[in-house]
Image (cartoon, grey):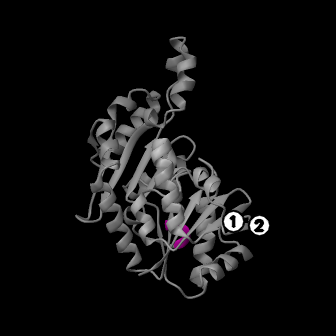
Amino acid sequence: MANTILVSGLLTYDSGKTWFSIGLAKSINKKGYRIGVFKPVAGHNLWSQYSSFLYSIKNGILVGEDVAKYSVILGFSEPHIVNPIDVLLSPLDPVSYIATNNISKYFIDLEDQFKQMVLARYSNCFTKTIKHYIFRENLDKMPPMIQNLLKSFASNVSAEEIELQSFIDLLRSTESENNLEECRRTICSRSDVTIVESFNDAITPYLRLLDSVSAVVVVMPTAIAIYTDIRKIREAIIENINKFGEAGFKTRQVLMKIPPERILYLKLRSSEAEADETFDEVMNILQL
């Protein structure tokens, strides 16, 4: 079984998970190990990450910015397995809110990611199929030019129109978790070391993943925190879920409860490919 490292972010955005994971993957690969990367769930924004949407159009499959980087920089050719679930968010139409004198609701709705979800992809690693979905209830809230762009892409990938809640129910289902595990096993079967990138500021994208993890690296701007006692992390998550519900998955809840075994500073790098001595220390801790 592959040595599996879970990379989690402390912040909701811009912790640097992908930046760190690519650098670590390249360092591990230089030592002769076959490297695999797995990002179970990804989300990206059409407005701020438009280049990844153009990448999706070119390749005929919805792919986020992080997974596009993994494909281009690390040379992975199966983004649908590297990232089985991808969700595209789009900016709401501010003009419609201003026109109805409802700008306060605009700011409230911006805080709700579910109101901005317009397209999604679900790759099934059991059946080897890829399905795209479009959420009409949200699409109508987007600026006209973006609606047209999304409709065109949805048509090209034969996206099925479903209610958003149906897709959310799928994400939270045992079926989805079983599928993610099958995708992970597929990647691990081809790798000596697998790096799993979590979602936003979740310590793990799903609880069962911890059964296969040998270390957790929490990434934050300028530093990382390392855990190898996975049992303690699992116990902390379960306790936090019982207390806070889904918010119990947040990385900060674990960090506040369990001191990390090691904390290391990261150096400033101008590119993902640039070396950092911290990667060598991480590999030593993981006995690679």
Q: Nearer the viewer, residue 202 or 41?
A: 202
- Start-end of magenta stretch: 70-74
- Give me the residue at 45% from left, 46% from top: 242
How far across and down, in percent of the image, does residue 79 sit? 41, 63
Q: Residue 143: image x %, image y %?
A: 47, 28
- Of residue 122 and residue 213, the one placed in the foreground of this image is 213
> Which dot marks residue 271?
1
Q: Main secondary structure of the magenta part?
A: helix
User: Residue 174 versus residue 188: which sits nearer the camera?
Assistant: 174
284 vs 1, left or right, is right
Residue behind mark 2? 267
Is residue 188 within the magenta segment? no
**Residue 45 appears in view:** no
Q: Secondary structure at mark 1?
A: loop
* Kind of residue at badge 1: Ser
Given the image, on which type of amino acid does mark 2 rest?
Lys
Q: Residue at x 49, y 33 (%)?
A: 112
Q: Residue furthest left?
A: 127
